[in-house]
Amino acid sequence: MPAGLTVADILVGLVPLLAAGVVVGIFRWRRKDEIFTDVTPGLVPVAGASDRTERVRRGVEYSGPVAVRFNPPDNSTPALSGTVIDGIVHGRDLTATLVDLALRGIVTLEKETTPKGKDDWRIARTGVGEETLAEHERVLLDALLAGKRSVLLGSLRQADVAQRWRNAEIAVYRAVVDRGWYRKHPRSRNGLLSFLGVALILAACGAGLVAAAAENHWQWVPLGVGLGVGGVLLIWRGRGRTPRTALGSAARIQALGYEEYLKTAEAGQLRHEELAGEIRSMLPYAVAFGVAPHVASVLGDALRSARIAEGSEAALDMAVEAAFDPGLFYLMDGLVDLVGSVDLSALADVDPGDALSGLLDGFDGLGDALSDLGDGIGDLIPGDGCLDGCDGCDVGCIDF
């Protein structure tokens, strides 16, 4: 041991290092997701039942078995379910919202060819059903149209549109917090510990200067080392994801369960008389989860099966609710040129067999068309979800 250096000096140097280690340990534990303990994972306790929670024990989020879910998640939308899975708003989440709005008849999506010969999509308001919009859906629609009745997607590739996309992301992040799935912004990284780490490193530098000027240099070395290493530890390990609440974990597990169903669904699993509802519920979530081609193929096979079992007219009725579902027809006519030049607003007057054949042909290309639309939306978003989506969000902002 160097002359003048005592055991007490070494212990003093260990104090900031151990304190930093304890703080990091507590912080890392609190960055684990919560989960309800007295119900099956994915369920939410009913009123009056025990709502006891605990932190997940392995990893930072629930990684146990997930039961396949045959219905969309509760109290959610495609964009919110896509976001809660990984805590990031992606382009496909916003695309799924557009598809959902189209199927609800609030907007139309029509594929157009530009004067330069490139494919583009025109998004237009119908003026119907906007009172049913959730806040994040309304903000997305405003971000796209900016007060206009219709707009070409390609025209949004401009710098002044970036802030409108940012507003759409903010709205989705705010929605998952408002639902109690996160206590603050999902992408907050807790810069406080990093700030404290920098403060410790500066203090270590100060200890070094004191040691250089002091008569007994070695007396200050342990403290300087302890402060410096403790500061590095806080900066290195003192950042972490925002944990989900128990409600957020339940929402994520439900989303994963429905995603598993969509990824593995087979036409034989779908009840013919429920096809109209299945089309409306499955397609937007399939876009959000990135499995649109598979789901579109399954729905097309289910329609073919229904035609064999029930006949063309009955199958068409079951698929599109009395052969006239404006949302579905506008969506498919715009994206895959359904039934060629046939005016879909008059589908009720055409032969059911011809209409169903057109519908089946449409499903054959619908999945790829939706994927292309998703790519187009993703291209408009800087970094495809890498905006922090925090400005103006009063529920806790990202802090790197």
Image: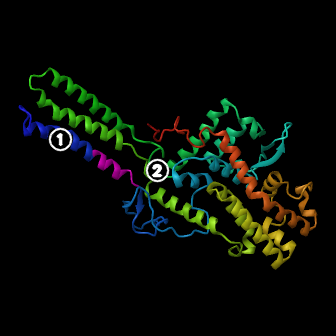
Disc 2, SS = loop
Of marks 1 and 2, the one in the foreground: 1
| Quadrant of res 119 | top right
Residue carrying label 2:
182
User: Looking at the image, which residue is at 71% across and 53% down?
Assistant: 371
Q: Is residue 250 above or below residue 398?
A: below
Q: Amino acid at mark 1?
A: Leu
Asked if disc 1 and disc 2 are in contact, CB closer than 8 Å, the reply is no
| Magenta segment | 23-32
Main SS of the magenta part reads helix
Residue carrying label 1:
14
Figure quadrant of the C terminus: top left
Q: Position of residue 302 (x, y in %)?
A: 75, 71
Answer left or right for 93 relative to 215: right
**Quick one: label 1 or label 2, which is nearer the N terminus?**
1
Q: Is residue 34 visible?
A: yes
Residue in front for this viewpoint, 338 or 128: 338
| Quadrant of res 285 | bottom right
Answer left or right for 142 relative to 121: left
